[in-house]
Amino acid sequence: MRSQARKQRGVAAVEFGLLAVILITIAFGATEFGRAFYQYNTVLKAARAAAREFTLPNPALTAAARKDRAQCLAAYGHYCVSGGTNVAVLEGLTKEMVVLDDPPLSCAFDSHPCAYVCATISGFKFVSYVPWIVPDITFASISACMRQLSQ
């Protein structure tokens, strides 16, 4: 009985060591995919915020100023501060990635004309903390379109 117990000594530690590598790899993979999903969702919400901001009529601002405000809102989470420091909502997200356009889509409901505005964020790259488990991911273009309010 004792000789068999001596042969079994340390078996649990070896089994745990073998399984720990697999379990840690799975844990890191799950957390990195969670981070990627969170960043994708944040970029999507930034595109929606930019489209929403650009659809609001503001006669006091030119179209270029409205576009700049919407781009700043998407990239920094607030309107740009001139001379101040603008910190991006996500590392790697820049104002230049946000493209706003008025596609030639139109509609008419009850003889009220309307137009659409689209905000597209292109080229955002998710940078993984553990690239040997989850590689860096460049997201496809993320767009949000909203109906423009009439002035």
Image (cartoon, rainbow, N blue to C red):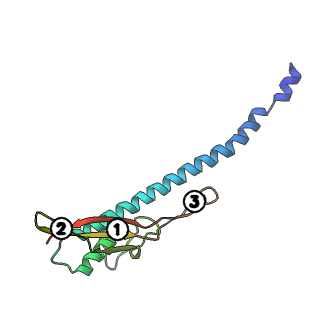
Please state the horizontal and vertical placement of residue 80, each as a whole percent of the image: 31, 74
- Comparing 123 with 80, the one in front is 123
- Residue sitting at 31 percent across and 79 percent down? 82
- Comparing 69 with 137, the one in front is 137
Quadrant location of the N terminus? top right
Label 1 close to label 2 by CB (< 8 Å): no
Report whether 69 appears left or right of 132: left
- Which numbered tag is attached to residue 74? 1
Quadrant location of the C terminus? bottom left
**Which quarter of the picture shows residue 87?**
bottom left
User: Going from the N terminus, do you reach mark 2 or mark 3 first?
Assistant: 3
The residue that disc 2 covers is 149
84 relative to 42, above or below: below
For the residues labelled 2 and 3, the Cα–Cα distance comes to 42 Å
Q: Report the residue that reaches farthest toward the right.
A: 3
How packed is label 3: few (under 14 Cα within 10 Å), some, or many (20 or more)?
some
- Which numbered tag is attached to residue 129? 3
